[in-house]
Image: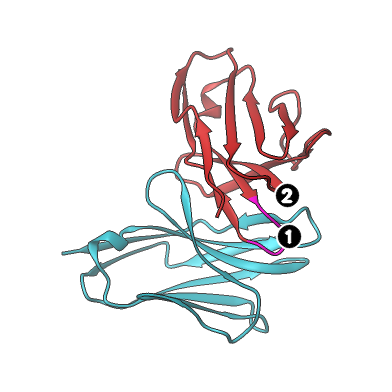
Chain colours: A red, B cyan
Amino acid sequence: SAVISQKPSRDICQRGTSLTIQCQVDSQVTMMFWYRQQPGQSLTLIATANQGSEATYESGFVIDKFPISRPNLTFSTLTVSNMSPEDSSIYLCSVKQGMDTEAFFGQGTRLTVV
Amino acid sequence: EDKVVQSPLSLVVHEGDTVTLNCSYEVTNFRSLLWYKQEKKAPTFLFMLTSSGIEKKSGRLSSILDKKELFSILNITATQTGDSAVYLCAVENGGSNYKLTFGKGTLLTVNP
């Protein structure tokens, strides 16, 4: 299985600021995803990070709020922009090495907005 | 819209007990069903099921899928305190970017 390094592990941020979360994989992967887990809730897909092109966002998530980059097959970033307390969540990077393989998750970033 | 329902939402057992966790689903283009264990932040992969009736087993954990009735179960035998976690069920949509839709999870507490 791929080894996924996600950072930061946690952060406390002021409202109105932005935070960029990084996801580094130790091998090339076909697919990379970003999920959000709000307190007491399950995981919800934010977007699929596409290598070399714009991410594909799920309903309710927009590029201006959650810009995503994926410059190559091993790295992606998610930015949470203009943060409000409602953005306090765990953000998780996920990867699939191939279409028929399972999805693995990074260690997660616990974000608190004050 | 894809949907996953897990039951029970929480469960408290004693060490040594056997538990069965349930997952029912609706998905437009079924590709697979996955089980994860979440202890802190990161879900860790347990099983990926694609075919009906074939049990997957790993130590004390096992899982099976019924694609006709649209459900799966996760069994844990001889539970240990280290099994305490949230168990997540997810379905993968093959026609939608391989998106995972998760259930709310089952919080399992194993008391000594």
- Tell me the quarter of the picture where residue B4 sits: bottom right
Q: The disc labelled 1 sits on which kind of residue?
A: Met
Q: Are marks 2 and 1 on the same chain?
A: yes
CA neighbours of label 1 inside 10 A, class few (<14), some (14 to 19), many (20+): few
In the displayed orientation, state which residue is furthest to the bottom. B53
- On residue A9, the disc is none
Marks 2 & 1, CB-CB < 8 Å contact: yes
Left or right: residue B38 versus residue B5 is left
Chain bearing mark 2: A
Which residue occupies the foreground of this view, B105 or A97? A97
A91 over B44 or under it: above or below:
above
Residue at the location (46% across, 39% down)? A39
- Image coordinates of residue B91 in percent, x first then y, are 64, 63
In the picture shown, does residue B57 fall above or below A68? below
Q: CA distance from mark 2 to mark 1?
A: 8 Å
Label 1 element class: loop
Which one is nearer the viewer's eye here, A26 or A81?
A26
In the image, taking residue A62 as reference, residue A33 lies left or right, namely: left
> Which kind of residue does numbered mark 2 sit on?
Thr
Give percent across and percent down for residue B7: 46, 68
Residue B43 in percent (x, y) is at: 48, 51
- Give the residues in magenta: A96-101
| Quarter of the image where one finds residue B94 | bottom right
Apparent side of residue B73 relative to residue B96 in the rendered image (left or right)? left
Most common SS among magenta residues: loop
Q: Position of residue A1 (x, y in %)?
A: 55, 55
What quarter of the picture does the C terminus of chain B occupy? bottom left
Mark linked to residue A30: 2
- Position of residue A1 relative to residue B72, above or below, is above
Q: Alpha-carbon neighbours of circle 2 within 10 Å: few (<14), some, or many (≥20)?
A: some
Question: Residue at label 1?
Answer: A99
